[in-house]
Each structure stands twice: as C-alpha cells, then as structure tokens.
Image (tube, coloured by chain):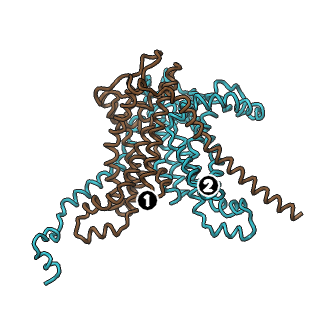
C-alpha cells in the first residue's frame, strides 16, 4: 500500500489529498490578471482621451500649435510656444540648480559622512520629498519669494547685471527664477537618492585602488566614484528633469502666470502645467479647452520621452527610488 | 615644491569635503524652514472652530476648514477603496503569475504611469467622468487619485512579494494547498506589513495632491451631501486661500497646511515603524 493510499484510508484525511478544485485557482488568477491589465488599459486610455480631447485643436492648428507664439483665448488663436519655452527654461534651470547640490549631498552621504549620520540625514532628505506641492507653494509665496525679491535678486542684479538674464525690472518676485528655485527644492531629494544609489554601486575595490595609489579622499571620490558614475549622474538629472516638467501647483503659485518671452529671469512666465491649472476650469470656448488638452498631451509626451531616457541611462540602478517619485 | 603640492592636495580635500557638507546643510535648509514657518504661522490658528466650522463668506474673518478636512478624508477613502485592491491584486499577478515578458511589459506600463504628471490625470478624468456626468464630483476626484495610487501600489506590492522566500510558496504547494490559498494566506500574510506600508505611502502621496482635483472634485464652500456633488479638499482649500486676497485666508491656509503636513509626516513615521526590521530598509521603502 502506498503512503498516499494509507493516508487517505485514515478517516477525515481525505479532503487534504483530494485534488484541489481548479475553479478557485483559475478565478483568482483571472482576477489578478484583470487588475494587472488595467495598467496597460490605463496607458491606452490616457493617450486616447488626451488625443480625443485635443482633436479640435490639432485639426485647427496642426504643427503651428507648437511654433505659434500667440495664445489668445478671446480670438480663438492658440500657439503653445510661450508655455513650451517657459516649461523648458524653468525645469532645466531648476535641474541645473538642483544637480550640483544633490551630487554634493550624495557624495557627503556615501563617501564623507560618519556612519551614524548617514541614515538620519538621508531620512531628512526623503522627508523633504514628502512635503506636498501646495505647501511648498504656500511657503514659496509668503517666505521664499519675498526673500528672493528683497535679498537675492538685487544682489544678482548688482553683480551679474551685465548678463541679459539678470537684467530688467525685478517686479513682484513672481518670476521664472522663483519657479526654478521651487522646482529645485522639489527635485533635490530624487536626484540625491538616485545619485546615492549610483555611487553606492561603485565597488569598494575601486576606491581602495585609488587610496593605494596615495589619493586623498576627494581624489579617490573623483577618480573612482565620479568617473565611473557619469552615466548614472545623467540618468539622475533626467529623472529630476522629468519630475520638474510636470510640477504644477508650487510652480503655478510662484511663476507669475503671464505668457510671453523675456530674456530676463526676473520676468513672470508660465508653463504647460501652470496654464492648464489656471485656464482649464474657465476655458472660454471648446477650442480653448481642446488647446489645453493638447498642452496636456504635449506635456505627457515630453515627460515620457525624458523618463525613457532616464531609464535607458540608469538601467537597473535607482529602481527603488524611481518607483512612484 | 613637492611638499607644497602635497599641502595643496590636502587643502583641496578639506575644501571639497567642507563644500559637500555645506551643500547637504543647504539641501536640508528648506525642510527646516518650511516646518518652522508652518508651525509659526499655522499653529496658533488651529483651534476647535477651525476644525469644526465651515469657511465664512469671502472676506469675513473666522470660520474653519471642517468641510475640506472631511472632504479630503472622503476623497482619500474613495481613492484607497478603488486603488489599493486593484494595485495589490495586480501586484500579486506580477510577482506570482506573470511570465517574464508580461511582467516586463506591465511593469513598463506602470512606470510610465508613475511618471505621468499629476495634472494630466485631472484632464483624463475630466474627459472620462466629469464631462459625461456634466459636473465635478467626489467620484471623479476619488477616481483621479485612485489612478495615481494604482501603478504605485502595483509596483510596491510586487517588489515586496518578491522578498518573500520561495520556500514559503513551495511549502504551501507541498502540503497540497491550492496556489491561490498559498498566495492569500501565506505569501500575502508574510508580506502584509510591507504591502500596508506601500498602500499607506501611496495614500499619503495623494493626500497632498492638488492638481488632479482642480477640475475633478472642484471645490465646495459647504458640505457635500452626495458623492455626485463637487467636494472640498484640504489641498485645494489651501491653494484657494493662499492665492486669495484676504489676510484671514492666508492665516487659515497656513493652519490647513500644518495639518496636511502633520498627516504626511505621521504616515511617514508609521511606515518607518512598520518596516523596522524588515529586509527592505525603510529608507528605500519611503522612496518607493
């Protein structure tokens, strides 16, 4: 008698050895599969809905939409160039401010800080990421912008006023540069976390090799860590940029919301996201609404491209950090 | 000469170290300043009236944000009720069933969605729900937040389930337990703290979202009686009051922001406590 048969001969044991019903398994599989598939469906829905909403605008303006400089809801003439430029300037500038700070912080965290300080400091940096955008915007309006307006901007104007970007009237302080500063604050935590992961991925033997050659701490960091991380650093910057592009609330609150071009960073501006936030509810015509949909579509496509670029550069690095940030 | 060069290298080392330290301080400065100003400007305004009263008519001082606080709770509950089950089940599929190819493509899609600017969700839900229903509603706002939660929770759940040792699954199968029971009662049970943390973090993230609510939940100066009516939310109220013209609004915006910030911090700390001793460092967890 086989063991199984012996077991099943025991009273009350039959149910365990009876082949389990396949139906429940299949049902559970189908349920989880359906839920996972919603993600693919969502990607489609987002694309289709934005495209459908933008249809009227795409029909009316074609490619002119992206090169037209005139945004005139009253006369139903829409060109997105001022917002594209505003988004590009504010987010690239914000990333440029955030990048060196983040890299230095990441170097501090992986290479310099004593072991006991690393975890608390990284925790604090992560806390910075958990501040909701609207709170940062509130703080921007009542604390940061007045300070920039009274202290930093006059200094920049006095000492770097020969540069066109620091010329022109300072106005109320609600401007491109304020937006870039608030963006920088928002993306520093992401770039820092990714850079930390990138630096940590450099094997210690590389650092040891540099030390063995008589390198100082900084030389070892530069030669062994930074040189090996160029790609990862670009990836981190791209990821920060992708976040910066879509930032809405805080930027809307400090950028001044006026479409137009100005070489001066002290001039107010507007971005794709801030324009959508400001005008969507009060869209004056169907074409206006459709043009706003197209702004959203453009924003989505640019964000996706930059995100993909970051993914390509980072590979498996920064996987954890990337999730959801 | 050589000695001088040596000195210079050493000096450079100290200079750069000092700079890095200074940069780390500068990065943390905004956090300190934001918390400082929130407490200084907001703490004195949080009182019983603020928590229990409706906003007064524009320009009249006094009143509170009771409807916005309740509205936010309703929106987050709706979002969690839709987003968390979908996310957790989807994550189960990715970790337990999916073939490598399917896993890669669904993950890719989830990452794309995670990178989507939150204002885009507002537009999409406007087209999907608000336009057909001819008006903003709590449903629409909850859905917009749920759509942000889903890809987040799918990915965190998947990551955490992958930390469950395969031995657990094999032991369950060896006992003849159906696969789904093994997953629900053994794998999920082992990973429940991590999954809960992921879900909590996703909720705390959407709790602070304003952009997707602008055209979906809109706002409401009073209580919403039905979920099909526009509904107030804390972030939206903070935004409106912050950019509004009245000093008393600004005061209340700070108070509301302090409450929102405390909620976000409380969830963060809870997650850290939950994840203590887990094999996934809490630092990474909060970033997920």
Quadrant housing residue B172 = bottom left
Tell me where residue B35 appears, x and y as whole percent.
55, 37
In the rendered image, residue A183, in percent from the top left (x then y), is placed at 58, 39
Q: Residues within 10 Å of mark 1 (few under 14, many from 20)?
A: some
> Left or right: where does residue A289 sit relative to residue B40?
left
Instruction: Answer yes or no: is residue A273 visible.
Output: no
Contact? badges 2 and 1 (CB < 8 Å)? no
Please tell me whether mark 2 sits on a helix, a strand or a loop. helix
Residue A167: quarter of image: top right
Circle 2 residue: A109
User: Is disc 2 surrounded by few (<14), some (14 to 19) or many (20+) residues within 10 Å?
Assistant: many
Between residue B230 and residue B117, name the one nearer to us: B230
- Give the colour of chain A: cyan
In the image, is B39 to the left or to the right of B191?
right
Chain coloured brown in the rendered structure: B
Which of pointers 2 and 1 indicates the residue nearer the eye?
1
């Amino acid at each position: 008698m086989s063991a199984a048969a012996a077991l099943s001969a025991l009273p009350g044991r039959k149910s365990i050895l009876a082949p389990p019903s396949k139906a429940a398994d299949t049902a559970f599989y189908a349920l989880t599969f359906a839920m996972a598939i919603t993600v693919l469906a969502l990607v489609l829905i987002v694309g289709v809905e934005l495209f459908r909403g933008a249809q009227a605008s795409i029909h009316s303006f074609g490619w002119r939409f992206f090169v037209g400089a005139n945004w005139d809801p009253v006369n139903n003439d829409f060109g997105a160039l001022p917002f594209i430029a505003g988004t590009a300037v504010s987010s690239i500038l914000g990333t440029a401010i955030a990048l060196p700070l983040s890299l230095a912080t990441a170097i501090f965290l992986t290479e310099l800080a004593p072991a006991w300080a690393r975890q608390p400091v990284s925790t604090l940096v992560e806390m910075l990421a958990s501040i909701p955008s609207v709170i940062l915007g509130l703080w921007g309006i009542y604390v940061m912008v007045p300070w920039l307006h009274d202290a930093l901007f006059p200094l920049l104007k006095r000492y770097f006023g020969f540069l066109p970007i620091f010329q022109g009237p300072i106005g109320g302080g609600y401007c491109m540069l304020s937006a870039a500063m608030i963006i920088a604050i928002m993306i520093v935590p992401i770039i820092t976390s990714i850079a930390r992961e990138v630096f940590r991925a450099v094997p210690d033997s590389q650092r040891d090799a540099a030390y063995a050659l008589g390198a100082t701490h900084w030389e070892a960091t530069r030669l062994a860590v930074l040189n090996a991380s160029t790609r990862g650093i670009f990836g981190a910057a791209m990821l920060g940029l992708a976040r910066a592009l879509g930032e809405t609330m805080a930027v809307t609150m400090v950028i001044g919301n006026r479409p137009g071009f100005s070489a001066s960073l002290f001039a107010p501006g507007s971005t794709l996201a801030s324009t959508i936030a400001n005008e969507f509810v009060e869209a004056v015509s169907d074409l206006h609404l459709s043009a706003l949909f197209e702004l959203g579509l453009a924003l989505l496509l640019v964000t996706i491209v930059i995100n993909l670029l970051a993914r390509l550069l980072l590979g498996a690095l920064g996987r954890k950090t990337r999730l959801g940030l | 000469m050589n000695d001088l060069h040596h000195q210079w290298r050493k000096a450079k080392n100290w200079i750069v170290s000092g700079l890095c330290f200074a940069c780390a301080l500068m990065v943390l400065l905004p956090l300190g300043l934001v918390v400082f100003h929130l407490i200084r400007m907001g703490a004195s305004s949080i009182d019983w009236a603020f928590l229990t009263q409706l906003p007064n008519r524009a320009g009249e001082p006094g009143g509170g944000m009771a409807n916005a606080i309740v509205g936010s709770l309703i929106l987050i509950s709706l979002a969690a009720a839709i987003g968390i089950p979908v996310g957790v089940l989807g994550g189960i599929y990715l970790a337990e069933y999916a073939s490598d190819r399917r896993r890669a493509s669904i993950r890719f899609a989830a990452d794309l969605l995670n990178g989507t600017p939150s204002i885009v969700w507002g537009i999409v839900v406007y087209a999907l729900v608000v336009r057909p229903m001819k008006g903003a509603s709590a449903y629409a706002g909850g859905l917009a937040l749920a759509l942000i939660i889903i890809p987040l929770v799918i990915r965190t759940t998947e990551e955490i389930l992958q930390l469950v040792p395969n031995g657990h699954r094999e032991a369950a199968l060896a006992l003849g337990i159906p696969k789904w029971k093994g997953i629900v009662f053994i794998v999920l049970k082992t990973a429940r703290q991590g999954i809960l943390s992921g879900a909590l973090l996703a909720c705390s993230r959407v709790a602070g979202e304003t952009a997707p609510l602008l055209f979906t939940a809109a706002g409401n100066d009073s209580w919403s009686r039905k979920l099909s009516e526009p509904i107030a939310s804390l972030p939206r109220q903070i935004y409106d009051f912050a950019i509004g013209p009245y000093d008393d609004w600004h005061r209340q915006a700070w108070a509301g922001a302090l409450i929102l910030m405390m909620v976000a911090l409380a969830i963060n700390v809870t997650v850290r406590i939950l994840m203590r001793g887990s094999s996934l460092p809490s630092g990474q967890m909060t970033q997920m």
